[in-house]
Image: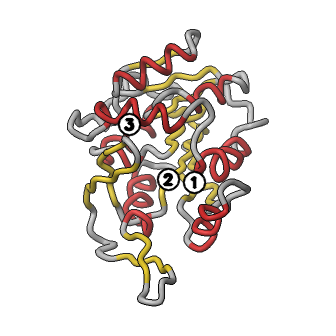
Amino acid sequence: MNNPDNGWEASARGWIADMGEHGDFSRLHVLDDPMMARIRGRGFQNALDIGCGEGRFCRMLAAEDIKVTGIEPTKELRQTAEARDPAGLYLDASAEALPFDADSFDLAVAYLTLIDIDGIDAATTEIARVLRPGGTLLVANLNSFNTAGGWRRREDGSKYFALDNYLDERAEWVSWGEIHIRNWHRPFGRYMELLLNAGLRLTHFEEPAPTGGDPDKVERCKRVPFFHLMEWQKP
């Protein structure tokens, strides 16, 4: 997340255009509703959005009367977040070295950002450190079989999903539109080990299905779920 060569600086403008004001298919039709369902009515007072990008989810949290701090190391994304939410707090910081005291937040959110973080060991330790006892970490992440595979076609033209080298943790470049960024593939067990070793306790797991949107994308998501949600609590 803190590596300047990960493609985010060059891709920021393309990302902002791709997200628009309300987000892409994955956010609008798969993740936003279950994410907000885990937040609304829980009495969270303050939240940390880790890798907040252009600030879209920070604004959604603020609309629930939650005091939000967003951290974002990519300058253009952070400046866009500030321009769209002048009252918000957006800091130049990385997950590996959070500039906050211990026990600072009721809620921490990693919304499709764990895959961007280089120093995942340090980051999970830091996230646990800044959560208050009883605090919640809410994660939306790509399923690890997705980051280890992709769609292929058989000779008859039908599609299937193939994966390989699942257990090999690695950084890979991914591209779409005007975006070219480096993501991390990690086996699912790696994330589980890190969060358990950070002293957190898993309280919710979900693989949400799409609720609408482009029919081709809906079909792909139902055949091979792209994402999962996890909720972890600090004892």
Residue 42: give x, y in percent of width and height: 74, 36
Residue identifier under label 3: 126
What's the residue type where badge 1 is placed? Met
What's the residue type where badge 3 is placed? Glu
- Kindly tell me whether residue 235 is visible in this rendering: no
| C-beta proximity under 8 Å, tags 1 and 2 | yes
Cα distance, mark 3 to mark 1? 18 Å
| C-beta proximity under 8 Å, tags 2 and 3 | no
Residue at image x 54%, y 59%? 227
Q: Left or right of 143: which side holds 163?
A: left
What's the residue type where badge 2 is placed? Asn
Residue 185: give x, y in percent of width and height: 34, 60
Question: Where's the N terminus, which quadrant?
Answer: top left
Cα distance, mark 2 to mark 3? 18 Å
Residue identifier under label 2: 141
Q: Earlier in the sequence, mark 2 or mark 3?
A: 3
Residue identifier under label 1: 230
Residue at image x 29%, y 33%? 10
**Mark 3 crowdedness (10 Å alpha carbons): few <14, some 14-19, many ≥20:** some
